[in-house]
Image (cartoon, grey):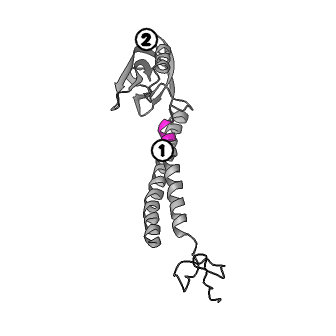
Amino acid sequence: MAIQGKGVLRLVGGIFLPLGLAFLGGAAWSGNRQNTILKTWPKTEAQVTKSQLTKSQDNDGNWTYGTALEFRYTVNGKEYNTPSHSSYQTSNYTGMKLQLDAFAPGTTHTILYNPADPNDIRFDAGYTFGFFLVTFAFGLIGLSFSLIGALLLLVSRGRTAGPACPSCGRSAGTDASFCPHCGAPLAST
């Protein structure tokens, strides 16, 4: 029975550990991507031409909110009108309403744009939780899965229980002189 239990621990640990490492790899890729955007994409001033609050309902009937915006800006003498949306949605209506108010039509903001495709913009880029949300989520899942997997694999190795009692057949422990289960003397080696 103990061998089967250890086998299950090895199987589950052998699944969780690689999945956790994959999520950690995804977190590293995502974090690197967001950091690259912050460090290498050029900045330009853009005027908000449209802004609205978006809302959607999940399967449990809870509402989440975001922002949908449109920006007008110029890159290399060419004018662009590009729609964009908040990098995350939240159940915090007040927080998204504040963002919407800050990005009211006619206001001007610094945005980042992809030099290879100036229609690819980020208006909420920064070293913030929202901008790195996917990185944090993948990292937390990856760390949890990796720790659980490693712990299960470690536990599955276990310690040897010691010799079996010649009288009852149960494990007696490595330093025992008498069986802790039946009291029979153990043969000394």
Looking at the rendered structure, which numbered label has been put on residue 108? none
Name which residue type carries label 1: Phe
Residue placed at 46% from the left, 49% from the top? 23
Name the one closer to the observer, 45 or 126: 126
Magenta segment: does it hold 150? no
Give the class, few, some or many, for how many residues have Cα within 10 Å of label 1's Cα (few <14, many ≥20): many
Tell me: 174 left or right of 123: right
Looking at the rendered structure, which numbered label has been put on residue 138? 1
Query: x, y percentage for residue 115?
Result: 45, 32
Residue placed at 45% from the left, 20% from the top? 93
Tell me: 156 left or right of 78: right
Residue segment shown in magenta? 131-138
Name the one closer to the observer, 16 or 68: 16
Magenta segment: does it hold 137? yes
Q: Which residue is mark 2?
A: 105
Circles 1 and 2, Cβ within 8 Å, touching? The answer is no
Tell me: 94 left or right of 163: left
Residue placed at 33% from the left, 32% from the top? 59
Magenta segment's dominant SS is helix
